[in-house]
Image (cartoon, rainbow, N blue to C red):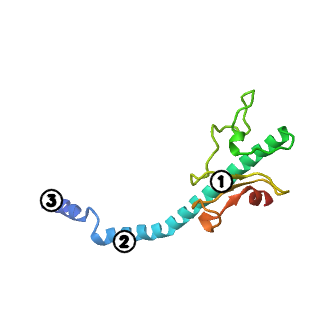
Amino acid sequence: MQLQHASKHVSRAKSGFSLAELMVVIVILGLLATLVVPNVIKQLFTASATIAKSDLSSISSAIDTYAIEHAGKFPERLEDLITPDENGHSYLKGYKSVPKDPWKNEYVYEPAQGGQPYRVVSFGRDGQAGGEGEDRDIDTVTILEK
């Protein structure tokens, strides 16, 4: 009878985690976080840049279609691409307004002038011309050259 009582006492003492075991788990989680977080942030920027390039490609196609259907005349502004024609169709399909870049800034449209092609630009995260990394400009001329 005494044996049965002793085994219950031993199993209670061994249940749970010791402070050392918890500290080891916390250190391991901290190390994983320092390795994973920078890569996740880098992937988020890559995803944002990819979304911007996709939007610019769609806008560029809509501008080209507009020019073809208007005897080589390019739109004066991006809003012309979403304005429905007499049949209710717009050039930038699927949008009720001109899309914004992934950083919630408006795309800037520079019509063709002096033999230069038109240009649509996202100024990156900072919304300012120029910059590097997440702040670098992404435009139709650059993405179409690649």
Q: Nearer the viewer, mark 2 or mark 3?
A: 2
| Distance between the alpha carbons at the discs numbered 2 and 3 | 33 Å
Of the two numbered discs 3 and 1 on the same chain, state the one appearing first in sequence: 3
**Distance between the alpha carbons at the discs numbered 1 and 2:** 43 Å
Disc 1 residue type (three-letter): Ala
- Look at the numbered disc 2 and give the secondary structure of its residue: helix
Image-quadrant location for residue 134: bottom right
Which of the numbered marks, if any, corresponds to residue 5?
A: 3
Rendered position, 88 above or below 17: above
* Residue 74, position as x, y percentages in the image: 80, 45
Front residue of 59 and 47: 59
**Residue that label 1 marks:** 52
**Given the image, on which type of amino acid does mark 2 rest?**
Val
Q: Quickly name the residue at label 2.
A: 24
**Identity of the residue drawn at 82% across and 57% down:** 116
Query: Which label sits on residue 111?
Result: none
Q: Earlier in the sequence, mark 2 or mark 3?
A: 3
Q: Pick whichever of labels 1 and 2 is earlier in the sequence.
A: 2
Q: Is residue 102 left or right of residue 31?
A: right
Q: Looking at the picture, which amino acid does disc 3 mark?
A: His
Q: How many C-alpha atoms fall within 10 Å of the one at disc 2: few (<14), some, or many (≥20)?
A: few
